[in-house]
Amino acid sequence: MLQTRTRRRAWIAGLATVVMAGAGFALSTQFANAQQSTLRSGADALGIDIGVAVNDSLLQNDSTYRNTIATQFNSVTAENGMKMEAVQPSQGSFNFSQGDRLIAFAQENDMSVHGHTLVWHNQSPGWVQNLSGEALRQAMEDHITTTMNHWEGDVATWDVVNEVVGDSNGQLRDSFWLRGLGEGYIQQAFEYARAADPSADLYMNDYSIDGINAKSDTYYQMAQDLVSQNLLDGMGFQAHLILGQVPGNMEQNLQRFADLGLKVRITELDVRIQMPASQQELEQQAEDFRRVVDICTNIADCSGVTVWGLRDGDSWVPDVFEGYGAPLLYNDDYTTKPAYDAVLEVLGGTPPDDDTTPPDDTTPPPTGDGDCTAVIDVVNDWGSGWQGNVLITAGDSAVSGWTLNWTWPSGQSISSSWNADISSSGSSVTASDVGWNANIAAGQTMNAWGFVGSGASASPQVTCTAG
Ligand code: 9MR
């Protein structure tokens, strides 16, 4: 059954399916206000995907999980079920059951499927990691061809290669694929994928390439090369982010890939918080989600945003980043978080509370133009570079905007930044707020923005001007 590459907008049809399938799930108030109250209706109206990574066992066993996803999202990605170790656990023996289940669910609910992933160094079975040379090349070709043929027309977009660039200097990742096949394996993978399903959009996908940096520069060069051979259709930016660290040049970065004629897509969005998360941090997280989704809606060729899991408790984050958690849109009891409301608003919806009169004790936003001070806090230093976070403290009255100035003592420079507008002239730097982080209450300190610096770390004196 062939699915076109165009976006699905059949919201009403999808909703009807959910109503019928949604026995036991109390949706009545949401349905009463359906056009305003789901992520999916907003994304459909904008013609973009709002996606979620799906856990196969929850999909099978938890009807609230299924119904929430069908109601709120128009796109799904298998969190693990389409990876090589799941699909081809032993050579030549394919198991499509998890992916088939997800596709059936997607089709019942008129959702698109983003395929993840064909060639990756992780979650690849042991047998393939022990091959090299011609045997490895043949195995890669067979895996891509058989998998894509099986789901031809059902999977609209594929992460053909995942995380093929390493974490330092923008070099290709030292993986068994690279060691066994040499640098040409990436292009080969795209050639096999294009031949296997010419109707699918083909993507590269990685983390820490959300801003402009050495790693995203490497992808930019690879993308130019693959586009010139008509082998690449899209670029996936995972966006596994840390609270308050949406890269300042993320939109510019995605736009440069879009300018190559590619779709861009935020593929695995989450924003992790050091636990326990305070209310203020959850509000900050909402602003981070808002910003990322806003970037996608600002770029004509952004095909959508996928969040990497539904509820905080479903997330991979606490297992990998000790002490961090709460990175998603939903609490474990399926109630929504401030980040959900923020995403809904960017997609043009109205969070339920917006329909009610604000409580009398709503604190008005600070409007003052008081004095402020700022310091650069060196939070990491790895010799060739360092990370600085900038803490701004308001004086006796509130601050409603800020501009910082300083001079580097010995040739430092900023190679990437988040949450501030920066301009530099020689060793002088000016940084100002980006709107949402303009307001600081009297006497409060905000961890307002940050950057990666090159050269030796430094904490020069910073002048802070409010207003
Ligand atoms: O969320 C996935 C988790 O359940 C797996 O254990 C893990 C194994 O590496 O992969 C996670 O998903 C990853 C995705 O496939 C690729 N980008 C990074 C994601 C988080 O690790």
Image (cartoon, helix red, strand yellow):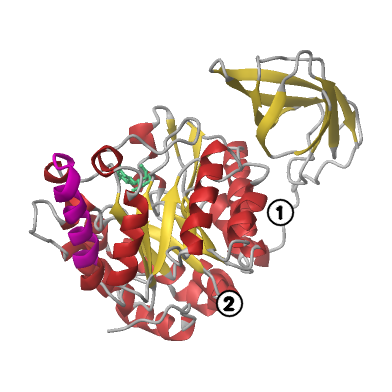
Type of amino acid under label 2: Ala
At 74% from the left and 38% from the top, the residue drawn is 420
Which circle's residue, 1 or 2, is located before the other in the chain?
2
Type of amino acid under label 1: Pro
Q: Quadrant of the N terminus?
A: bottom left
Which numbered circle lies on residue 359?
1
Answer left or right for 207 relative to 295. left
Q: CA distance from mark 1 to mark 2?
A: 31 Å
Helix, strand or loop at label 2? It is helix
Q: What crowding class fits label 2: few (fewer than 14 Cα within 10 Å), some (14-19), or many (20 or more)? A: some
Q: What crowding class fits label 1: few (fewer than 14 Cα within 10 Å), some (14-19), or many (20 or more)? A: few
Query: From which residue to which does the magenta span run?
Result: 129-147
Q: Judge whether residue 271 is colored magenta.
A: no
Residue 353 versus residue 210: which sits nearer the camera? 210
Residue 91 image point, x, y percent: 9, 53
At 17% from the left and 42% from the top, the residue drawn is 132
Which numbered circle lies on residue 440?
none
Residue labelled with disc 2: 45
Answer left or right for 88 relative to 244. left
| Residue 385 figure quarter | top right
Q: Judge whether residue 130 is colored magenta.
A: yes
Residue 111 image point, x, y percent: 39, 74
Residue 143 image point, x, y percent: 20, 59
- The secondary structure that most of the magenta stretch takes on is helix
Residue 455 image point, x, y percent: 66, 18
* Circles 1, 2 touching at the beta carbon (< 8 Å): no
Residue 364 versus residue 342: which sits nearer the camera? 342
Q: Is residue 179 visible?
A: yes
Instruction: For marks 1 and 2, give the one nearer the viewer.
Output: 2
Q: Quadrant of the C terminus?
A: top right
Q: Is residue 399 visible?
A: no
